[in-house]
């Protein structure tokens, strides 16, 4: 029986946890909370865990880019 070998594509993360979002932005807990409270970035809450939408973080950075 011939075995088929396929290439597995890596899955791009769509949601970041708090530490990943802070590292991505290079910011503190307080600044991340400010962005969340001001509806600057999208997030989802499941229990005590908060997940941040990577695309909304990238849109925030693009909106605030200084040329």
Image: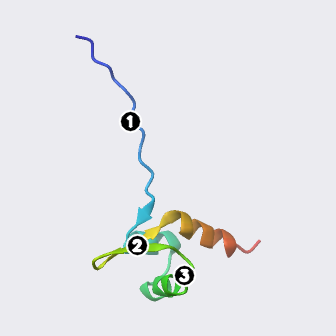
- Residue 53 image point, x, y percent: 48, 67
Q: Give the mark, 3 or 1, whose residue is nearer the N terminus.
A: 1
Q: Please report contact status of discs 3 and 1: CB closer than 8 Å, yes or no.
A: no
Residue most extreme to the top: 1
Instruction: Please give the name of the residue rendered at 49% of the width and 80% of the height, measured from the top-left corner.
Output: 27
Q: Secondary structure at mark 3?
A: loop
- Residue 39 image point, x, y percent: 54, 81
| Residue sitting nearer the eye, 55 or 7 | 55
Instruction: Please give the name of the residue rendered at 54% of the width and 70% of the height, measured from the top-left corner.
Output: 57
Q: Give the mark, 2 or 3, whose residue is nearer the N terminus.
A: 3
Kindly report the distance in space between the C-alpha atoms of the residues bearing marks 3 and 1.
36 Å
| Residue sitting nearer the eye, 8 or 27 | 8
In this figure, which residue is indicated by the disc labeled 3? 39
Q: Which quadrant: the C terminus?
A: bottom right
Kindly report the distance in space between the C-alpha atoms of the residues bearing marks 2 and 3.
12 Å
In this figure, which residue is indicated by the disc labeled 2? 44
| Residue sitting nearer the eye, 27 or 7 | 7
Kindly report the distance in space between the C-alpha atoms of the residues bearing marks 2 and 1.
28 Å
Q: Please report contact status of discs 2 and 3: CB closer than 8 Å, yes or no.
A: no
| Front position among marks 2 and 1 | 2
Rendering quarter of residue 49: bottom left
Q: Which mark is residue 8?
A: 1
């Amino acid at each position: 029986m011939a075995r088929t070998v396929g290439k597995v594509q890596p899955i791009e993360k769509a949601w970041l946890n708090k530490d990943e979002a802070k590292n991505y932005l290079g910011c503190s807990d307080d600044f991340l909370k400010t962005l969340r409270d001001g509806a600057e970035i999208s997030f989802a809450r499941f229990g005590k865990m908060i997940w941040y939408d990577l695309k909304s973080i990238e849109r925030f950075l693009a909106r605030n880019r200084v040329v």
